Amino acid sequence: MNDERSKPRILIIAASQRALGGQAVMAHQLLADLREDGYRVGFVPVDPRPPGILHHLESIKFVRTAVRTFFYLIALLRAMPNYDVIHIFSASYSSFLISPAPAILLSRFFRKAAILNYHSGEAEDHLAHSWRITKWLMRLPACIVVPSPYLVSVFQRFGFSAAAIPNYLAGAAIAPVERKRVQPKLLMTRALEPLYNIPCALRAFRLVKNKYPQAELTIAGEGSQRDCLQRLAAELDLDNVTFAGRIERAEIGRYYEKHDVFLNTSSVDNMPVSILEAFAAGMPIVSTAAGGIPFIVTDRLNGCLVGLDDHAAAAERIIELIENPAEAARLSRAGLVESKKYTWRAVAGQWKELYRTLSRTPEFNDPLESDVEIPATERHACGV
């Protein structure tokens, strides 16, 4: 196999770096890592910034969607013929129909092998309440790839085959620090949105502060709930709560360095990159057992898990870590070991093999050749 054939041309379709959330982080890290490994990789943002004077139209709510969609479709039409495999990142609900759906349909029109890389922890509700056209569209790509076995099981319940390729540590310079003991310095790095249930974290922090008045909580992220969360912090009489806003990837490492315990209280989740970063930083983790989190955090083995919306249990586990340095140190070491599973080198082979397999599938690349059988192991992995 020559080098060109062994390295198919890949087009990644995802949100731009202006977008908040782990999905955009993951897409752009994958883009950078594949390019560094010598792959020809293109990128089409689902949220393109209109050129020139049209940029001002982004301030008009419905006009913004129409203008972005127009330029998104133009970019897809121009780029797609030049690539072998179309890698489409996807979330749930209406955003699925606005962003992944056009890319799925055009990949079919151009007879390109497409990967639907679905990241949302809301998949079960999305699939349960979606229109028939959504389920039809999801059957068009050659593969559905998700970050965790949790989402594999969700898709299976709705009759879809999916393969799991995990998220991995993405780009941020995070210093690994084995913590011998921890102080009541808590960190959350989640978007300020309802599914992450940050009110639960604030109520847990209130209980921690009752015992440790000097305790600190930093919430790194931005979102629609910022004002109501700040009001709740005031109602709970919480000082030492910092809403740090959006943190650039180059800066996130210092937040992990300055804090000792990672707190996550989401109600819906999949495989948060922020938890992988906490592992890499050597921070003991206290998290709710939402969605796919128990697939990466095992209670008392490499972190602490509590029930959904149980702020009292979260506070109890935080206090336990502060008062039991040996346990905190053990979980810190376990997290550092666990982080080795989630590096580019640990997952690169899975992505590259999948790209290679799909680029060689005659059904998509050469309409004149349709009698070549895909090996059974590859058929299972690709969901075809």
Image: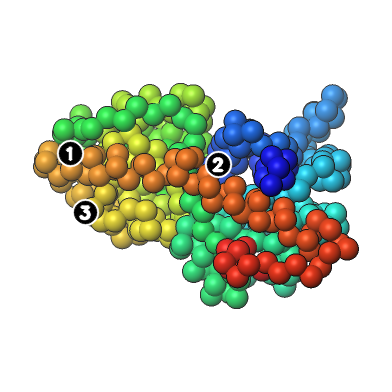
Residue 131, disc: none
Residue at 16% x, 34% y: name it: 181
Disc nearer the start of the sequence (1/3): 3
- The answer to whether marks 2 and 1 mark residues whose Cβ atoms lie closer than 8 Å is no
Instruction: Looking at the image, tell me whether mark 2 or mark 1 is earlier in sequence order.
Output: 2
Quote the CA–CA distance across marks 1 and 3: 12 Å
What x and y, as percent, mark residue 315? Answer: 23, 48
Q: Residue under circle 3?
A: 300
Residue occupying the point 31% across, 60% down: 307
Tell which circle, 2 or 3, labels the residue nearer the N-terminal end: 2
Q: Quadrant of residue 20?
A: top right
Q: Position of residue 216 (x, y in %)?
A: 28, 31
Give the residue type at disc 2: Met
Q: Is residue 208 visible?
A: no
Q: Residue furthest front?
A: 1
Q: Quadrant of residue 252?
A: top left
Mark number, residue 329: 1
Q: Secondary structure at mark 3?
A: loop
State the CA–CA distance, disc 2 to disc 3.
Answer: 28 Å
> Callout 2: helix, strand or loop?
helix
- For this view, does 103 lie left or right of residue 196? right
The residue nearer to you, when weighing 164 against 21, is 164
The x, y position of residue 319, in whole percent, is 17, 44
The quadrant in which residue 333 appears is top left
**Nearest the camera: 23 or 232?**
23
Kind of residue indicated by mark 3: Arg
- Rendered view: 50 above or below 134: above
What label sits on residue 26 in the rendered view?
A: 2
Q: Is residue 37 among the parts visible in the rendering?
A: yes
